[in-house]
Image (cartoon, rainbow, N blue to C red):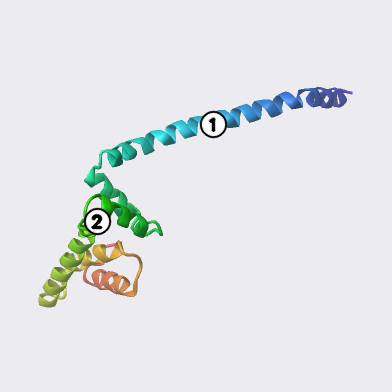
Amino acid sequence: MKHQEFITKFKYRLPYVKKFILIFLLLFILVFNIVYSQFITPLYIKFTYQDRGATISYLQKIKDTKYYSKQISRFKNIYDPFIESEVNQQEILKNEESIKLEQILKLNPLSRDVLYRIYQLKADGGNNPYQNDLLIKIREIDPTINN
C-alpha cells in the first residue's frame, strides 16, 4: 500500500519536477553565458580599439587552425602586411636560437645543457624522431634527467 501511495504522489509531482529541472538548466545556461561573455569582451574591446598586441596574440593562438589564413588576410588590410612577420617572430627567434645551438653542439657534442635546450625547442613542435634521439643522448650524458 505504501508503495502505491508513493507512486501516486510521484505521478502527481512529476510535472513539477520536470519544471524544476528545466528551470535549473535554463539558469545554468544563463550563468554560463554571462561568465563566458566576460572572457570574450576584453578581447573584443581590444580589437575595436585596434590593439596590435592583442591582434598578434590572437593570431598566434589560432595559427594552427583553418581560420588563420582568413584572419591574417583580414588583419593585413587593417594594419599592414608586416603583421604576419610579427606573428611569426617567436617562431623565427626559436629557429635562430636552434641554429646557434646546433653550431655550439658541433664544437662540444656532449654539452648536456645545449642538448637539453635544443630538446625543449623541438618539444614545442610535437613528437619527432630527432627529439627522441636528443632525449636518449641527454640521458646517456646525465641519467638524472627525466624529461
Q: Position of residue 57 (x, y in %)?
A: 27, 49
Q: Looking at the figure, which quarter contains the N terminus?
A: top right
- Quarter of the rendering containing residue 63: bottom left
- Quarter of the rendering containing residue 123: bottom left
**Residue at the limit of the structure toward the right, as seen here:** 1
- The nearer-to-camera label among 1 and 2 is 2
The mark tally for this picture is: 2
Seen at 29% across and 74% down, the residue is 130
Are the residues flagged by discs 1 and 2 in contact, CB closer than 8 Å? no
Q: Looking at the figure, which quarter contains the C terminus?
A: bottom left
- The residue carrying pointer 2 sits among few (fewer than 14), some (14 to 19) or many (20 or more) residues within 10 Å by Cα, namely many
Q: Which mark is residue 28?
A: 1
Is residue 109 rendered to the left or right of residue 51?
Answer: left
- The residue carrying pointer 1 sits among few (fewer than 14), some (14 to 19) or many (20 or more) residues within 10 Å by Cα, namely few
Badge 2 amino acid: Val
Residue 135 in view in this figure: yes
Seen at 26% across and 38% down, the residue is 49
Circle nearer the N terminus (1, 2): 1
In front here: 145 or 52? Answer: 52
Q: Position of residue 47 (x, y in %)?
A: 29, 42
- Report helix, strand or loop for mark 2: helix
**Residue at the limit of the structure toward the front, as seen here:** 77
In front here: 128 or 57? Answer: 57
Q: Which mark is residue 79?
A: none
Q: Determine which residue is flagged by label 2.
A: 87
Badge 1 amino acid: Phe
- Report helix, strand or loop for mark 1: helix
Q: Position of residue 129 (x, y in %)?
A: 33, 74
Residue 144 in view in this figure: no
The span from disc 1 to disc 2 (Cα, nearest Å) is 38 Å
In front here: 33 or 99? Answer: 33
Seen at 83% across and 27% down, the residue is 7
